[in-house]
Image (spheres, grey):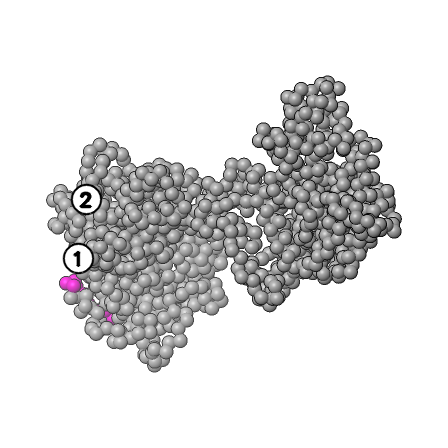
Amino acid sequence: MSTTTYREAMRDALAAALRDDDRVFLMGEDVGAYGGCFGVSLGLFEEFGPERIRDTPLSEAAFVGAGIGAALGGMRPIVEIMTVNFSLLALDQIMNNAATLLHMSGGQCNVPIVIRMTTGAGRQLAAQHSHSLEGWYAHIPGLRIVTPATVDDARWMLQTALDDPDPVLLFEHGALYGAEGELTDDLGPVDLDRAAVRRSGTDVSLITYGGTLPTVLAAAEELAGRGIDAEVVDLRTLRPLDDEAILGSVARTHRAVVVDEGWRSGSISAEISARITEGVFYELDAPVGRVCSAEVPMPYARHLEIAALPSVDGILQAVEELGLRG
Amino acid sequence: MGEFCMPSLGADMDEGTLLEWLVAPGDPVRRGDIVAVIDTEKSDIEVEVFEDGVIGELLVEVGTTVPVGTPLARIEGATDAGRRSAPTSPPVPAPQPVAPAEGPPRGVATTARTAGRVLSPIVRHLADERHVDLHHLAGTGPGGVITRRDVEGAPRSGPGGVAAPLEHRPTRATPADGRTRSSPYARRLAAEREVSLTAVVGSGPGGAVLAADVPAAAPVDRDAGMRDAIARAMARSKRDIPHYYLQTTVDLGVALDWLRTRNEACPVVERVLPAVLLLKATASAAAEHPALNGWWEDGHRPSSDVHLGVAIALRGGGLVAPGIDGADQMSLTELMTALRDLTGRARAGRVRQREWTGPTITVTNLGDLGVDAVWGVIRPPQLAMVGFGAVHDEVLAVDGAPAVRPVVVASLAADHRTSDGIEGAALLSRIAALLQDPDALDRPHPHPTGGATP
Amino acid sequence: MSPLDPAHGRHLLEQMLRVRRMEERCAELYTQSKIRGFLHLYVGEEAAATGVIEQLEPEDAVVATYREHGHALLKGTPMTAILAEMYGVAEGCSGGRGGSMHLFDMDHGVYGGNAIVGGGLPVAVGLALADQLAGRPRVTACFFGEGAVAEGEFHESMNLAALWDLPVLFCCENNLYAMGTALARSESETDIAAKAAAYEMPAWPVDAMDVVAVERAAARAVTAVRNGGGPHFLELRTYRFRAHSMFDPERYRDKAEVRTWRERDPIDLLERRLRDEGSLDDAGMAGIEERVASEVDAAVAFAEAGTPEPVETLGRHVTSEPTGGGVR
Amino acid sequence: MTALTESDARDLIAKVLADIAPEVDLDGARPDGQLQEELGLDSMDFLNLMIGIHDETGLTVPERDYPALSTLDGAIAYLAERTA
């Protein structure tokens, strides 16, 4: 075990993948000479050179599409998109090609690409750099959506993603990059089909992923002080959802609050809530609660941004509304 | 081939839980045999079969709660003729939304009736809001289903057709449709623990019952479930039945002297309570006054048989009023035996279906509690309730001189739709007269006596 | 103009006729409801694909559009598999999952009909990038219509391919209409080759009603691309004789215009030339037609005998089978 | 008929009542209060009590003696006296 940051863990993962497999290369805007917009790929350009740490023009559609083509051509591209908002410029390629080619070719063209992007708010980057659209992507069959939330997952999810024969979108919450945590040195590839219970509890299941995991864990601690024993489920993968873990947890606690930095309407939290009612309706002792971002484009002003995002207080209130009082 | 269906055992029963099968496939049954025990909100009830035949497949497992009309078992070899020849089946006191003049025998659900019970949430809501009695509403939807328009066009059952103000909703979150607001988990736990949710006070939002509110075991719940059942039945009675009231004071001097002598002469187990005299007198009088004996089921259905309901207070609260069939035909000893048996079973929660649904008139006797008189609330679909207060001494003019006599105040609450005061008065007078001739009263087939009227 | 090698000339003619006769039958089958969905026919444009693909090696890649029946056939996909795909049966080259617009055939380097205009270009660039990174001497031919020139993906892809010197041959089939919108109504600069040239890649227009001219241009371009010359661009000037798809009232162009272009039907042009040069006689022509007709008949019979995929396996091919297999 | 002490008589009443009215709490009843009120018994219950006493002891309590048994103390004393 050693203490490291999420950013360094991700960088270690990239370096290891580049060292282990010649087919792996990283491409994206300013991943090379600049070291990555968020510094994730700092130093890799020097070690692996401009062919494998490939700076691209600001052409999200072309370089994501090129990643898809390269994957079809036998490579294992890792494509970095600066933020999830920019990925919309490449949405055609992600949706109409990466997610779809295997199926419309009758199983001939699998696309082993990993697309990494920053997601989420919390850094006053306003309405075109701060959204959480991973839930949107989770709507699309053919994609795997993963959301590392811990240092270990940042370090060890990438390899599993690269081993996947199909496209994987990896969402890194911007607020997590500087987060420090204990890194398990030889954990090895993470099973991306499985959610993780980050805290066991008996009274309520707090279901979340990615950037809101620390918030939820903090809320769980606060609840513990009030005599409420919360279980925290880190989804890790938004598609495919680990129904077994979600439903299993709710079946134990009989109450659920889904915490999702995405907007509430038509969100992954809505999907999870629906699955809970479909799967364990008769285990529910309260309606499923949700804590989501306010339905506004993310504002710049600090206090407004904070007000728009899921918070410990918001989670505590949602738990209280379930009829749970310590 | 016939079906044995979940019977409706009262106007307020929508579903029942099968507690016990008393027969097995292959058992021959005759009409009237008790074949199963059903749990309702009020009581465990032994239910009978209405056909001759052989029990075929059992369709519902013990412990299952099903809506009224759901087939519970098949009956092989049952004939239509057998089904028709059930004239002594009492009419169905259960709701008949689509009002056939000649309803099917009780327990045999028809499609229309089943369909009529399918009520959409909006229909329930509207009916509740507008005080429309869905039980008496014919549905125009497919299969007789009651539609929103049916409710909107229906007369309100509140006084003067004006919607009564919404009743205060109690903490116990039971809307008018009888469905309790609860979490799904609580609902499931309640089913597993055989707890009636209507009896549970919820701690959740809007009084919703949460899992923690569901007690570990059932016993306390029946009372509250019964309270609700009584509440519904009595509210319906006061809503639907135009009551009128009469009272008279009956001299019991002769009857009690007679009884004292009789009881002294016989073993303690054969002693007869004074109440039995009152019951017998009421039953005999009722037989002669069909305007007050029978049911209101889509119109007046007088009965020539007397199935005498007896209000029995339960320990710990609650009230049931099962009946004694043919009470007018019994000797006092027989009636006493029947009353003792019925009281014991009622208090043990084991009343038979027929006793539950059969009564044609009911007696309530609050004499033990020392009240002078009782003004009863008629139990739908019956037509009258006879009440007795405490036997007490009064100074009466006897043969032109004051005399202290034991008396009882007999009262009558009757349905003005089927009788007028003159008939009610005749019934009370007849009761009083019969009580002046205990010997005649004790005969299994009493004849009219010309006894004095107080 | 020097005479064509007779055998090669007849081969080109037969290739174009295979495409033409197959598609004519497709149109008929469409009216019989045997083929559904959109059906975009290439009739009139056969020389473009025939001339280019004739110059490709079997291992080279083709990325095409929803008007790609000819490209797949010419690249080697059996006509039986193409017809079966249009019938939506399991024997189809895409297993019945793609249909007319999405013919895929990895065995013959057919990377699909892409039905998003411009959507195939970045993928072609990526295939070329993989080849470059892997040091493979493969050429990726990317076909698209002139409508795609208005898409951002076109410009991004031109830039990226030129920037990275990728081995991709862009083949713009300029049939003058983006569905119903004439080129001049959608482009400020209608010289498409000039647009490509602005990205610093060799680009020139070709008379694509003349298969020989196309073949000559393609030979030059393919050789250059394969030899590390970076991306090349051919503007193949052609014309679509039939409607855009089966449902198209063709209000946007004169019948006279269509008649004029039909006079330069690429098949007629080549046939006349071969006859003029003494390389083809009636018997030779009849022999070609007969071979093509029997191939089409066989393909239709194959498709007719096809087996629909069982609905139970609906969820296949959403994720790869070895690891996943289920619906993700 | 065996003689009953007051304690035996009380136990007998408790035993018989356990069948008639299982929930009654004899200890919670005032010994000099009206039995029917204290224990919530009605006339049927009282009759059943008499029957029960008869079954247990063979003692027949005539109706005219009922007033003597109207309190718990009275009933105990009566039974002790009658069985003595």
Residue A178: which disc? Answer: 2
User: Which one is nearer the viewer's eye here, B447 or C169?
Assistant: B447
Q: Quadrant of residue C6?
A: bottom left
Could you classify mark 1 by the number of other residues whose Cα lies within 10 Å: few (under 14), some (14-19), or many (20 or more)?
Answer: some
For residue D36, side relative to residue B196 (left or right): right
Tell me: residue C81, above or below residue D40: below
User: Which one is nearer the viewer's eye here, C228 or B65?
Assistant: B65
Please give the range of residues in magenta: C199-207
Residue at the image point whose x is 45% and y is 66% from the top: C30
Tell me: residue C38, above or below residue A287: below
Q: Residue furthest front?
A: B401
The residue type indicated by label 2 comes to Gly
Residue A57: which disc? Answer: 1
For residue A240, side relative to residue B397 (left or right): left
Query: Mark 2: which secondary structure?
Result: loop
Residue at the image point whose x is 78% and y is 60% from the top: B422
Expressed as whole percent of the image width and height from the top left, the position of residue B424 reads 76, 57
For residue B342, side relative to residue C327 (left or right): right
Expressed as whole percent of the image width and height from the top left, the position of residue C106 reads 33, 51
User: Which one is nearer the viewer's eye here, B412 or A29?
Assistant: B412
Callout in the foreground (2, 1): 2
Q: Quadrant of residue B26?
A: top right
Expressed as whole percent of the image width and height from the top left, the position of residue C190 reads 22, 73
Could you classify mark 2 by the number of other residues whose Cα lies within 10 Å: few (under 14), some (14-19), or many (20 or more)?
Answer: few
Residue B6 visible in image: yes
